[in-house]
Every structure is written in structure tokens, then in C-alpha cells.
Image (cartoon, grey):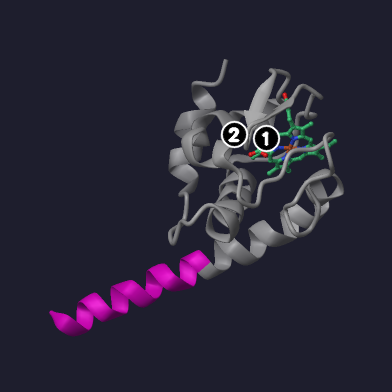
Amino acid sequence: MVYALAACQSQDELKLKHYYIEGQALYTTHCANCHQENGEGLAGLYPPIAKSDFLTNNKNYIICGIKHGISDTIQVNGKTYRQPMPANAQLQAIDIAEIVTYIYNEWGNEKKITPVKEVQKILEKCE
Ligand code: HEC
């Protein structure tokens, strides 16, 4: 039993590593222009993802926002942002799952993957 459990955990760790590495590469390509490689954003224009209070409570909203863009006025760490974020219609659920896994492990205190199945379900319900 103990061995089976240990094997299971390392499978999960491998999967997390895989999602994280893919997610980091996708982030560099699709997100870092605005939010910067270090996640700190660009003064006043593009909100930070690193240490963002918005990240914690709005995961579903962010998943939909990556796919369809964001055009609301939002508050991040007490600052107001109203510049639109462009859609990424070409990104598939798996790409978004990897990006979200990357940003939430890097900057959102998570130690787990956001599975593609969960992202698919959320994407079906975006408005
Ligand atoms: C062209 C610049 C641009 C690109 C590229 C971009 N964003 Fe954004 N992002 C923004 C702006 C501007 C906002 C604020 C939107 C608003 O105020 O309605 C935002 C908001 C966010 C937020 C919510 C606020 C926060 O900082 O916590 C997250 C998370 C986010 N973006 C992640 C991403 C990810 C992941 C990608 C890549 C898939 C990405 N963005 C690509 C400009 C961009």
C-alpha cells in the first residue's frame, strides 16, 4: 500500500512539472509582453499577476478571460485597471490549463495542477 501511494504521488509531481514547464513557455509567448516575465505587469497599464489579490478569488473569471479577453473595469491590489486584455481564441483548454497551472503555482500559492477537464468545464460556462 505504502509503495503504491508513493508511486502515485510521484506521478502527480511529474504531471505538475510537465504542466508547469509547458505553461511557462506559453506564458512567455502569449502573456509576458504585457504582464512581464516576472509577473509584475507594467505601471498603471497592465496589472501584476505576481502578488495579485485578484488572482486568488477569480480563477474561473481568469480562465474565461484568457480565452475570450477581459473588458471590465477591475481592481488589482487596490488599483483600478480598465484597459482591455485581448482574447486568445487560438489557445485550447490544455494550453490554458498549463498557463493557469504555471501562474497559480508561481504567483498564487498553489501546489497542484489545474486539470484540463476542470478548464473545459469552466470554458463551457463562460459568458
Ligand atoms: C496586450 C496586453 C495583455 C496580454 C498579452 C495579456 N494580458 Fe492579461 N491583462 C491585461 C490587461 C490590460 C488586464 C486588465 C483588464 C481590465 O482591466 O479589464 C489584464 C488582466 C489579467 C489578469 C487579472 C488581473 C490580475 O493581474 O490578476 C490576469 C490573471 C491576466 N491578465 C493574465 C494573463 C495571461 C495568463 C495572459 C496570457 C495568456 C495575459 N494575461 C495576456 C493585458 C494583457
Q: Tell me where the magenta segment starts and ends, as one range.
A: 1-16
Q: Is residue 6 shown in magenta?
A: yes
Q: Secondary structure at mark 1?
A: helix
* Residue visible at 70% across and 40% down in the picture: 91
Residue 80 position in % (x across, y down): 71, 26
| C-beta proximity under 8 Å, tags 2 and 1 | yes
**Which residue is at a point 74% across and 38% down the rendered structure image?**
47
Quarter holding ligand 1: top right
Whether ligand 1 has any atom under 8 Å from the Cβ at mark 2 is answered as yes
Q: Which mark is residue 62?
A: 2
**Which residue position is annotated with label 1?**
66
Q: Residue at x 58, y 55 (%)?
A: 107
Q: Is the residue at mark 1 in contact range of ligand 1, meaning its CB lies under 8 Å from it?
A: yes
User: Residue at the location (78% across, 46% down)?
Assistant: 41
State the CA–CA distance, disc 2 to disc 1.
6 Å
Frontmost residue, 98 versus 62: 62
Q: Quadrant of the N terminus?
A: bottom left
In the picture as drawn, the residue positioned furthest to the top comes out as 127
**Label 2 is placed on what type of residue?**
Ile
Residue 110: percent from left, percent from top: 46, 56
Q: Amino acid at mark 1?
A: Ile
